[in-house]
Image: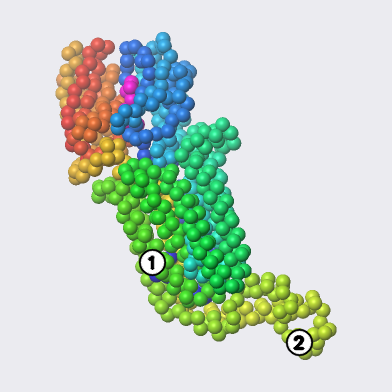
Amino acid sequence: MSATAPYAGPSPIRRPVAAAALLAALVSLVFGLLLAGAGPASAHAALTGSDPQDGAVVDTAPKEVTLSFSEAIAVGDDSIRVLDPSGKRADTEAEPRDLSEGGTVRYGVALHSGLPDGTYTVAWQAISADSHPISGAFTFSIGAPSETTVALSSQEAGGGPVGVVYDIARYAAYGGFVLLVGGSAFVLICWRGGASALPMQRLVVRGWLTLTAATLVMLLLRNPYTGSGKFADAFDLAGLQSVLDTKPGAALVSRLLLLGAAALFIAVLFGTYARREDEQERKDLTFGLAVGGGVVAAGIAATWAMSEHASTGIQASIAMPVDVAHLLAVAAWLGGLASLLVALYRTPDIGSAAVRRFSAVAFGSVVVLAATGIYQSWRQVGSWSALTGTRYGQLLIIKVALIALLLAVAWFSRRWTGRLTDTAVASSGAEVGSSRDEEEDAATEPETTAPAAPDEASDDVAPERAAQLARQRAVLTATKKKRIRDADPERSGLRRSVLAEAAVAVVLLAVTTMLTSTEPGRTEEEAAGGATAATAPAAGGPVNLSMPFDTGGQNGKGTVRIELDPGRTGSNDLHVWIDGSDGEPMDVPELKLALTLESKDIGPLPIVPNRLAEGHWTASGVQIPMAGDWKVDVTVRTSDIDQVTIDKNAKIG
């Protein structure tokens, strides 16, 4: 809910079950659409260079192949594989050597000696510092290019059915955390009587079960998610052991251990605490539960902070505790909102004082969210161009808009709260639970029966008949009380506004979860050593270059024309035309390009375009990591021995 939504007993949207079903349908629809459009999770790290370069032809076999990345990665034995033209391993199959120095992240694998000529394929797969899998492949040739039988899977790391199930588990884990922590906080801080309410107990327990099940699924699928992409490998003990040795694996195991402590907390909260009648004892127990529960909740939140975006990049030591505070505020706000919705529909005895206490808690949560959110936005985005020009920034804008909408709806809830009284509850008698709860109480306590009918003297009524009469009387009484409560227009309006808040909160939680798996807009700046991204205005259109060349051989003169569209940071389409000295399209045996941003020490980033037609080559998905004055190197080979490399600078982005 928002900083303003207080709530009390049930009121009529006539059909609470239908309203709950509508909300559940909305949850399913939102998560389904987001999962359908999310695709494999983006990662921080990216391949920035290699030796040999992609498409290179070397005279003699190199002793090793090295790969450079934009930030730290975790590698294993098969993280870098080099395959010969027949598909056999050309590397020594040892764990890649860490060749990093200074701000450069580089790994290498040794090759067998005496490798024959031909085209070799380098396939790599690793785990970025923020826990997301990354992969790719390229080729180089020894002596001369050749045919190759190597066929690599087109599926990206973290994709496929395993990736979909893993992402569903991630969404479920956040949802379970919100219900577990927010529901418990609602009972302890706002409505202590809710500890004995069966619907509140179910809400918190279901949150615990959801988070526990989702964490187990993520732990089992972690190996295939970052590796083979096959469900069967979820039960590979060796793979599971390797997962436990990683930062994400340790975080998941820690979460399971903390959930064990959370189970004990729940047992005390809805057991010993709910049955306490002595006020002083209850206060002491409240303090103990608040301290213990707070530690456990912070610990569970830390399992996300220690393994995802907050744990890498600038100011990680500050970002992780800030992330913990942000997650706890989200849980207190949205989890409390879910608890309030349940209380309004399923436990009509909640009073106006509890609703107003939650309004205060929600306000405090919003203040914390605002402070931590501003810091996180600065850290992950860093510039206005990244805010509007990256997927992470766009999702962040959507999140802020949803929070604003949630606060607007909460303003209406606050107005209903101001009008709220406990008159309806008081007029209906002492506090009671839902009709179902009262039936259960009557069934288990037949001695609290109403007076028997006149023709059935108490001495002659059988115990079974007495219990039946008690249940009937309880149902009639509960129905009457519910009718009185539902006639309260303030509670009716409050319930409608809370339901609207819950609907917005579902979408907000989904967008927040997507942000954790989306590459931050500041990634490129981090790759350049933490410098602020260039903020040059976007080009008005495609970048066009014209570069004359002369290889020195027969028919070695011509002109290279290049078009980079849209000519700004992100993905671009590249077209290259070569015209001969006569102005006609000219084919050449080999054409390569490379991009270098010398001011940031980025590159060269190799590009090997594909021949589309005579004198026309193209490449799609050319990534420009940041705006700047890029040097474009073009290598043209017109015969076996005639080759030239020309270059020209271009303002891109």
Q: How far across and down, in percent of the image, does residue 510 sit?
A: 44, 54
Above-or-below relation of 49 to 60: below
Above-or-below relation of 151 to 244: above
Residue at which label 1 appears: 363
Q: Residue at x 21, y 42 (%)?
A: 534
- Specify which label sits upstream in the sequence, 2 or 1: 1
Q: Is residue 587 left or right of residue 20?
A: left
Q: How far across and down, in percent of the image, does residue 320 sit?
A: 39, 48
For the magenta stretch, what is the residue range? Answer: 47-55
Q: Nearer the viewer, mark 2 or mark 1?
A: 1
Residue at which label 2 appears: 453
Of the pair 632 and 417, the residue shown nearer to us: 417
Mark 1 is surrounded, within 10 Å at the Cα level, by few (under 14), some (14 to 19) or many (20 or more) other residues, namely some
**Quadrant of the image containing the C terminus:** top left
Of the pair 547 and 511, the residue shown nearer to us: 511
Mark 2 is surrounded, within 10 Å at the Cα level, by few (under 14), some (14 to 19) or many (20 or more) other residues, namely few
Q: Amino acid at mark 2?
A: Ala
Q: Number of marks in the image?
A: 2
Under circle 2, the secondary element is loop
* Colouring scheme applied when the structure was drawn: rainbow
